[in-house]
Amino acid sequence: MNAINTIRHIFHESTMIALVIPGDYRDDGIKFFTPQEFSQQVGYMNRPAGYIVQPHIHNEIHREVRLTQEVLIIRSGRVEIDLYTSDKDYLESVQLVGGDIILLAAGGHGLNFLEESEIIEVKQGPHAGEEDKTRFAGQKRVGDGV
């Protein structure tokens, strides 16, 4: 099976800012969409009935996380996510609907809830509160959409 509704990688220069996985993405086997050095790994698995993943535990391994990367799973609704470079310059906006997933890998982002929406957020811990982020007045370029 060839991938249906392919994955979208959004870059600024050579830095991956975001990775968008459409809710109706399908492929065979197992695929990881993130570079091995990312502190947050995002993958996809499609296996037939009866396939077995051998029971296992994850070993304690010291890892250093220098940048919080987060995954948003849109359960329902419609959300527009504004993407910014690390210099806080507007890059582009993406609209996501129920079933879509986005990895916010670098740069900045803001969310605009276009409909009542449910989102599951996954990121590294422990949560550092306000020390974890720098807020800024995001602004789209003049003439850009909503």
Image (tube, grey):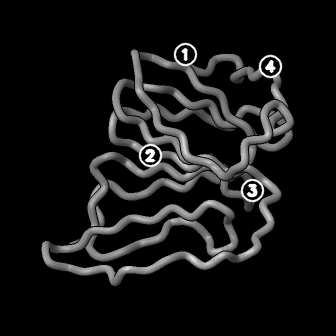
Question: Tag 3's secondary structure?
Answer: loop
| Pointer 3 or 1: first along the chain | 3
Instruction: Give the image location of residue 41, x and y in percent.
Output: 57, 64
| Pointer 2 or 4: first along the chain | 2
| Pointer 3 or 4: first along the chain | 3
Q: CA distance from mark 2 to mark 1?
A: 21 Å
Q: Nearer the viewer, residue 116 or 5?
A: 116
Q: Which mark is residue 101?
A: 2
Q: Is residue 37 above or below residue 42?
A: below
Determine contact: label 4, label 1, CB under 8 Å. no
Question: Tag 4's secondary structure?
Answer: loop
The residue under label 3 is: 13
Q: CA distance from mark 2 to mark 3?
A: 23 Å
Indicate left or right for 81 with 46 as reference: right
Which residue is at a point 75% across and 56% down the rendered structure image?
A: 13
The residue under label 1 is: 146
